[in-house]
Image: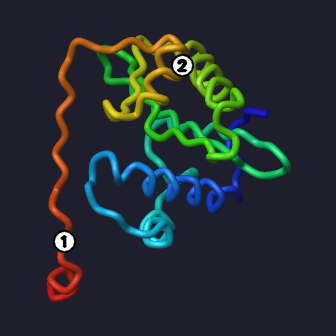
């Protein structure tokens, strides 16, 4: 079942975000931290009414637990309305069973209902499973080059002394 996240489910969603970050690190961060460290980092992420703009977190539920998420962000820039799938994750044991497809279908319905002109999703070149999933859901490879700036990690001791 796909539905919007309910208040009180933030910690379950944070747990999935930590697992996503843990799996994702091998694709671009080139460092390996245990999942517990990622959970500590995401434990303070605002994922409810504290967010600015239109953010909808869709969750997939099975066996009375949240097993997947699709975090949709919608921005009305004044000249157009754009959206992105900011975070997307399905628990390993539920992959290949249509959960991701259902989450993306729900996200696309949301984008249509919100009258979004274009929606984006980002992934790594090496994540061929995700690329196939997104393409099968109707997302097209863009002509634009996406570039990213990742600020260097702050030295924890240096940050405390300021």
Quarter that holds the N terminus? top right
Residue at 73% from the left image edge and 35% from the top image edge = 3
Tag nearer the camera, 2 or 1 = 1
* Residue at the disc numbered 2: 111
Quarter that holds the C terminus? bottom left
Residue at 45% from the left image edge and 14% from the top image edge = 139
List x then y, in percent, for residue 105. 63, 20
List x then y, in percent, for residue 53. 45, 38
Q: Residue 106 occupies which quadrant of the picture?
A: top right
In the foreground, 8 or 76: 8
Q: Secondary structure at mark 2?
A: helix
Image: 77 above or below 159: above
Q: CA distance from mark 2 to mark 1?
A: 36 Å
Q: Is residue 111 visible?
A: yes
* Residue at the disc numbered 1: 154
Question: How busy is the neighbourhood of tag 1: few (under 14 within 10 Å), some, or many (20 plus)?
Answer: few
Q: Are marks 2 and 1 in contact (CB under 8 Å)?
A: no
Image: 137 above or below 25: above
Residue at 61% from the left image edge and 54% from the top image edge = 13
Report whether 46 appears left or right of 123: right
Report whether 65 appears left or right of 72: right
List x then y, in percent, for residue 103. 64, 29
Image: 107 above or below 136: below
The circle on residue 142 is: none
In the foreground, 133 or 9: 133
């Amino acid at each position: 079942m796909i539905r919007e996240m309910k208040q009180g489910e933030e910690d379950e969603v944070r747990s999935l975000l930590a697992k996503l970050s843990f799996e994702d690190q091998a694709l671009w961060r080139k460092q390996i931290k245990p999942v517990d460290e990622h959970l500590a980092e995401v434990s303070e992420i605002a994922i409810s009414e504290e967010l600015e703009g239109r953010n909808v977190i869709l969750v997939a539920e099975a066996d009375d637990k949240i097993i997947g998420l699709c975090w949709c962000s919608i921005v009305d820039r004044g000249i157009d309305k754009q959206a992105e799938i900011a975070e997307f994750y399905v628990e390993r044991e539920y992959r290949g069973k249509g959960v991701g497809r259902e989450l993306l279908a729900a996200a696309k319905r949301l984008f249509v209902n919100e009258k979004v002109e274009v929606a984006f999703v980002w992934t790594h070149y090496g994540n061929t499973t995700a690329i196939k999933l997104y393409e099968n859901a109707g997302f097209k490879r863009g002509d634009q080059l996406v570039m990213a700036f990742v600020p260097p990690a702050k030295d924890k001791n240096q940050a405390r002394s300021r």
